[in-house]
């Protein structure tokens, strides 16, 4: 009996050697990796291009405060002096309003210590001598943006006055639309400009604080808090925020996705395998061989479990490669994952991890048996794939529910989802993280029950003649007999 | 002589159609028995039932004393079935396929594999993938598979279908040799020449009923004709009338 099983498993595993299988596995990985690299490289080269060319910003300053006392110009000047590397992409052109309000100028005299003419970390600040007058600025903005300016910042006349009064103050930004508005790279430039606006706000904070609290060190003002996060988890203190600790386990994305893929591959591979046996006329011979029908089913199921697990692992590897190549921060991500894995494995119970592995294998087996049943009722690979898709979709799709709905191990909704065997590995994982081994055990016991019921059903099906006769066949269309022009049927 | 197959009042009914209507016949051990009849006569259904693939609606079928419904697993260890439209695993080479079958039957000695290679007569193509084989090459491989383990009963549905004349003659001779070594054969064929040459006895089946059983010579004498083809024709026409 044991050798029967091994022979059948070996036969099923020959799928792994097929060129189409290897192609089917390697292609998506390569495609995902290539897309990740293309996108990552595209982003990188766009950033590099922007960095080398710089962002052309023209500031229309309608604020009438004298230039050495203007709050906006002081902020620009501080950015210059701060040696902020990020600022080294901006080419700033100033169009000033004629200073008229000497009273405000007087009030700001004490803070006008920054000089615009010092050497600048901002790539270039130039004053073009043009004087802005009149509102609204749209006409001027149109003319500037059509002549190579990337963004125009309009500083209204009450800017310094509002700062003086401690009121929030506005600026207006006019962005030039990217050449291809649907290109993801077009938005990168906008993002870099946004950084500049953020920098303006941050520097304005600095400006105000250093004005009123001159003894504060500037670094404190820029980064007053440096966080060192820890997570309290089941009595243990783990280094890292919950996002860092649990993110690597993909509680929100990777595990549900992997379950979806595993269920899908196990079911469709088994259904296709049965469809092939029927289409290639090998099933009849197989069923008359001196192998117990139950062993044929078990052999096929185990073969499919191994094939499906291999496929799911390869696809997830491809997905991770994609994400890593996309984020272009491979080392940081990799480090985060290894830290959390090593810290978590100390806390998660070994029994729980074994139960999770067992649950995943059982789920793949259940999927494989569903596929075999679908294949038994079909007469070709095509019909088998269609039937298996109808089975798998409603059962595997709730995996995505877990991505968006927070469900704890005590939540009654979890018990409903537990009834779907494809969801149980996710349920077991939740139990494992909650330290609820009993919950994991119940889930595995349920899966075992479903597995054996399905094994009985599938073996019975293989023992019956239904597996030979099939169930769903495409009905041949018999064209209606027509007489003459096909309009009238005359009985003589 | 011991009975290899015993079929009594066998009926097989599908949903809206009765394929076999109460047939009875016996096959003696060491005999080559032919089941002949026109298309849709119920030949393949009968063979499939004896091969344990289908279950009888009523009646009794036993193979070497084992009941087809109760002892199907024991029967499968004794028989070898070659369906009319059989295939082999396309991603295996011919030799891998034969090794797989030898493993299934628990045949360890290399003589069985050598015998299969000889019957298949595929030359160096035995090391190529089955997917590259012609229909005739696959048929030869499958015949080799069916006979390599020296089964007690070989059920062959149209054994030489798709083979050229030279290969068909060779296979017929192999079947005769295997019978001499102790294998009982149940053969279904449309080729009356083949049946007359090979079979010790034949049963003529039409519309799910057996109308004649006997040796080709007996039947030819009974109908006073020179060949089995004419016997067949007369039986079918008389049933139609």
Image (tube, rainbow, N blue to C red):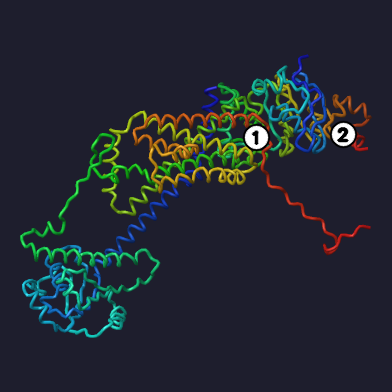
User: In the displayed structure, would residue A162 be above or below residue A377?
Assistant: below
A259 relative position to A386: left or right: left
The quarter in which the N terminus of chain B is drawn is top right
Q: Mark 2 points at which residue?
A: B232
Residue nearer the viewer, B207 or A466: A466
Helix or strand or loop: what does disc 2 sit on? Answer: helix
Could one spot residue B145 in this view of the protein?
Answer: no
A39 relative position to A332: left or right: right
Residue nearer the viewer, A349 or A277: A349
User: In the displayed structure, would residue A402 be above or below residue A204?
Assistant: above
Discs 2, 1: same chain: no
Residue nearer the viewer, B193 or B107: B107
Near mark 2 (Cα within 10 A), the count class, few <14, some 14-19 or many ≥20, is many
**Residue depicted at x 23% and y 41%:** A239
C-alpha separation, residue under disc 2 versus residue under disc 1: 34 Å
Given the image, what chain letter belongs to the residue carrying mark 2? B
Q: In which quarter of the image is residue B230?
A: top right
A219 relative position to A136: left or right: left
The quarter in which the C terminus of chain B is drawn is top right
**Residue depicted at x 5% and y 72%:** A110
- Residue A233 in picture, x, y percent from top left: 28, 37
Residue nearer the viewer, A362 or A419: A419
Q: Mark 1 points at which residue?
A: A467
- Residue A275 in picture, x, y percent from top left: 60, 41
Q: Quadrant of residue A240?
A: top left
Given the image, what chain letter belongs to the residue carrying mark 1? A
**Residue depicted at x 63% and y 24%:** B149
């Amino acid at each position: 009996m044991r050798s029967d099983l091994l022979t059948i498993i070996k036969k099923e595993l020959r799928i792994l050697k097929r060129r189409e299988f290897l192609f089917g596995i390697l292609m998506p990985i390569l495609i995902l990796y290539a897309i990740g690299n293309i996108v990552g490289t595209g982003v990188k080269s766009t950033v590099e291009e922007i960095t080398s060319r710089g962002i052309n910003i023209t500031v229309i300053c309608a604020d009438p405060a004298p230039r050495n006392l203007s709050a906006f110009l002081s902020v620009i000047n501080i950015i210059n002096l701060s040696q902020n590397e990020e600022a080294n992409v901006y080419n700033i052109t100033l169009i000033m309003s004629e200073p008229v309000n000497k009273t405000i100028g007087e009030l700001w005299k004490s803070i006008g210590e920054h000089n615009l003419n010092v050497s600048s970390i901002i790539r270039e600040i130039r004053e073009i001598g043009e004087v802005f007058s009149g509102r609204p600025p749209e006409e001027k903005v149109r003319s500037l943006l059509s002549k190579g300016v990337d963004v125009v910042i309009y500083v209204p006349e009450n800017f310094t006055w509002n700062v003086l009064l401690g009121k929030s103050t506005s600026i207006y930004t006019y962005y030039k639309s990217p050449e291809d508005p649907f290109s993801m790279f077009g938005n990168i430039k906008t993002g870099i400009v946004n950084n500049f606006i953020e920098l303006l706000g941050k520097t304005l904070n600095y400006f105000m604080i250093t004005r009123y609290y001159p003894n504060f060190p500037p670094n404190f003002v820029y980064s007053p808090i440096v966080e060192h996060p820890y997570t309290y988890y089941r009595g243990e203190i783990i280094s890292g925020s919950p996002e860092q600790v649990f993110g690597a386990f993909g509680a929100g994305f990777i595990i549900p996705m992997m379950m979806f893929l595993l269920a899908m591959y196990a079911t469709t591979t088994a259904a296709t395998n049965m469809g092939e046996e029927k289409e290639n006329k090998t099933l009849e011979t197989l069923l008359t061989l001196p192998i117990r029908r139950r062993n044929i089913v078990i052999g096929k199921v185990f073969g499919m479990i191994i094939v499906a697990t291999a496929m799911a692992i390869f696809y997830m590897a491809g997905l991770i490669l994609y994400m890593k190549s996309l984020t272009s921060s491979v080392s940081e991500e990799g480090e985060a994952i290894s830290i959390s894995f090593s810290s978590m494995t100390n806390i998660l119970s070994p029994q729980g991890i074994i139960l999770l592995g067992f649950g995943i294998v059982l789920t793949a087996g259940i999927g494989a048996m569903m596929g075999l049943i679908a294949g038994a009722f079909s007469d070709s690979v095509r019909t088998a794939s269609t039937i298996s898709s109808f089975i798998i979709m409603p059962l595997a799709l709730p995996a995505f529910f877990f991505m968006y709905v927070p469900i704890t191990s005590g939540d009654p909704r979890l018990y409903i989802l537990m009834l779907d065997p494809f969801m149980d590995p996710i349920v077991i994982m939740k139990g494992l993280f909650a330290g609820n081994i009993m919950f994991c055990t119940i889930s595995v016991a349920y899966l075992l029950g479903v597995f054996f019921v399905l094994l009985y059903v599938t073996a019975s099906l293989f023992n019956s003649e239904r597996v030979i006769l099939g169930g769903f066949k495409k009905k041949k269309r018999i064209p209606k007999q027509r007489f003459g022009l096909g309009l009238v049927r005359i009985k003589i | 002589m011991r009975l290899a197959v015993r079929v009594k009042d066998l009926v097989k009914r599908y949903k809206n159609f009765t394929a076999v209507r109460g047939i009875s016949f016996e096959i003696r051990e060491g005999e080559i028995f032919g089941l002949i009849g026109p298309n849709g006569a119920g030949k393949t259904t009968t063979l499939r039932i004896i091969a344990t693939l289908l279950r009888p609606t009523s009646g009794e079928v036993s193979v070497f004393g084992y009941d087809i419904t109760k002892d199907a697993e024991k029967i499968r260890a004794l028989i070898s079935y070659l369906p009319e439209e059989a295939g082999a695993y396309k991603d295996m080479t011919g030799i891998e396929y034969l090794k797989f079958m030898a493993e299934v039957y628990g045949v360890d000695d290399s003589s069985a594999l050598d015998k299969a290679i000889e019957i298949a007569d595929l030359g160096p193509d035995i090391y190529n993938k089955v997917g590259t084989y012609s229909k005739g090459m696959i048929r030869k491989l499958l015949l080799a598979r069916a006979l390599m383990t020296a089964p007690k009963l070989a059920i062959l549905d149209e054994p030489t279908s798709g083979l050229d004349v030279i290969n068909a003659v060779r296979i017929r001779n192999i079947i005769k040799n295997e019978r001499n070594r102790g294998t009982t054969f149940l053969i279904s064929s449309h080729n009356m020449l083949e049946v007359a040459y090979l079979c010790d006895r034949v049963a003529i089946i039409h519309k799910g009923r057996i109308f004649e059983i006997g040796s080709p010579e007996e039947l030819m004498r009974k109908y006073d004709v020179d060949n089995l083809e004419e016997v067949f024709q007369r039986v079918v026409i008389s049933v139609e009338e």
